[in-house]
Image (spheres, helix red, strand yellow):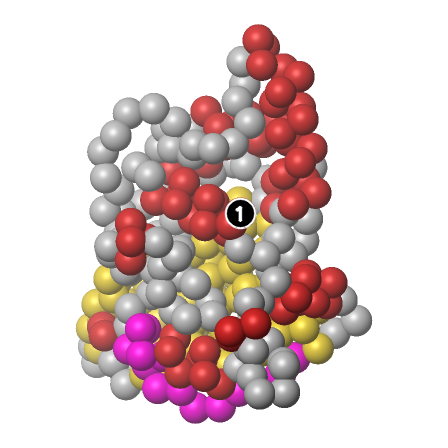
Amino acid sequence: MRRLAAILIALAASSACLRSTTAITVRADGSGTVVQETAVSAQALAMLKGLAPASDKDAGGQPPSLFGEEQAKKAAAEMGVRFVSGEAIKTETHEGYRANFEFDDIGKLQMKMNQDPTTGTGRSEADANERPFGFKFDRREASSILTIVVPEQKPGGGPLVGGLPGTGSENAQANAQSLQMMKVMMAGLFVDISLGVDGRIVKTNATHVEGSRITLLQLDFDRLLADDAAMQKLQAASDLKALAAIPGLKIVAEPTLTVEFVK
């Protein structure tokens, strides 16, 4: 039951202005692609580079790259995919990297909800032990069926998400201060993991579906932190289904998703 807590805390510990999207696409034969885009604001990037210790800088005094081919290849090894290509991305507000991967068998893909987009791994020992999504593929004569097994939620009482401002009136002032700090620290933080099919979905029990693509996880902290009631619901939630109606948060609440599609 602590899976979302690990995601939120890990993201809070990372760059506040992180934008990360992971788009998985599955073909009719079970092969497919993964496209990951990771970027931070130019201001945050400059700050992170400035914090790099002298020992990590190259002969010219330049700090190590946060995003690039080296990091993408590490991510590929962790996810069980092949790195194909990559390119730097730069907008008016963000800088980062777009990495393109391929796989031959969706069943071998290792994708976690708390995936570090720069290396593919979790951010702590506990995160590293987190089980990935399970993917099972069945190609039939008329259609293909993809089954997605969501990592088992470990039992444990209490709120699902810890480390966020509480709801008790006795802590109203402290809660307000904590919430304001989070709004500043996490402004612009956006994470999205989606899965699409190369074809047309004819049947699925997924909740968040748009065309041929479903959302496995989406965290939009600007929307989430703009609604104090949403934060209270998030803090009080004891199971994933209780998170279904919270603005800025899309997450798979069912233990198993099935997607039947045709080319």
Residue 129, image quadrant: bottom left
Left or right: residue 190 versus residue 125 is right
What amino acid type is highlighted by mark number 1?
Ala
Helix, strand or loop status at disc 1: helix
Q: Is residue 224 visible?
A: yes
Write down the region rendered in magenta.
Answer: 76-89
Left or right: residue 198 versus residue 176 is left
Q: How many marks?
A: 1
Residue 81, image quadrant: bottom left
Query: Where is residue 222 shown, x and y percent of the image?
Result: 67, 46
State the residue in front, 261 or 250. 250
Residue at 49% x, 85% y is 69
* Quadrant of the rendering where the N terminus is positioned: top left
State the residue in front, 85 or 260. 85
Q: Is residue 145 visible?
A: no
Q: Which residue is mark 1?
A: 12
